[in-house]
Image (cartoon, rainbow, N blue to C red):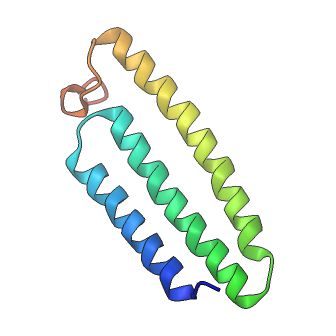
Amino acid sequence: MVELEYYLILSGILFSIGVLGVLVRRNAIVVFMCVEIMLNAVNISLIAFDRYNNQHDGQIFSFMVMCVAAAEVSVGLAIVISMYRNKPTINLDEFNLMKW
C-alpha cells in the first residue's frame, strides 16, 4: 500500500509545475494545460485524503473539480478562438483587446 505522503508529494510537484507553467509561459493553450495540471493535482490530493480517512467526500469533490475543469476549458478555448479571429496570435502578451 502506498502511503499518503507519496500522494501528497506527487500532488505538490504537479501543482508546482502547473503554477510555474502559468507564470512562465505566454501561450494561451499551454496556460490552460497548466491550469488543468493544477486541477489534477488537487484531485490527486482529494482522492488521497479520501482513501486515508475512509470516506467518500473526496471522490465527490474530485468529480465536481473535473466538471468545473471541463467548463473552464470550453469557455477558455472559446475566448481564445474569438480573440484569435481578431488578432492572429495566441501569445498572451499581445492580447490587449480587453484594456480600456
* Number of numbered tags placed on the structure image: 0
Q: Position of residue 87 (x, y in %)?
A: 27, 13
- Residue 95 vs residue 10, the one in the foreground: 10
Image point (71%, 80%), residue name: 50
Question: Taking 3 as reference, is 100 left or right?
Answer: left
Image point (59%, 84%), residue name: 2
Question: Taking 70 as reference, is 9 left or right?
Answer: left
Q: Position of residue 56 (x, y in %)?
A: 80, 76
Q: Position of residue 48 (x, y in %)?
A: 63, 78
Q: Position of residue 46 (x, y in %)?
A: 63, 73
Q: Quadrant of the C terminus?
A: top left
Tell me where residue 14 sits by quadrant. bottom left
Q: Residue furthest front?
A: 1
| Rendered position, 67 above or below 43 | above
- Residue 3 vs residue 80, the one in the foreground: 3
Question: Taking 38 as reference, is 60 left or right?
Answer: right
Q: Quadrant of the N terminus?
A: bottom right
| Rendered position, 77 above or below 66 | above
Image point (41%, 25%), residue name: 80
Question: Taking 51 as reference, is 97 left or right?
Answer: left
Image point (74%, 68%), residue name: 59
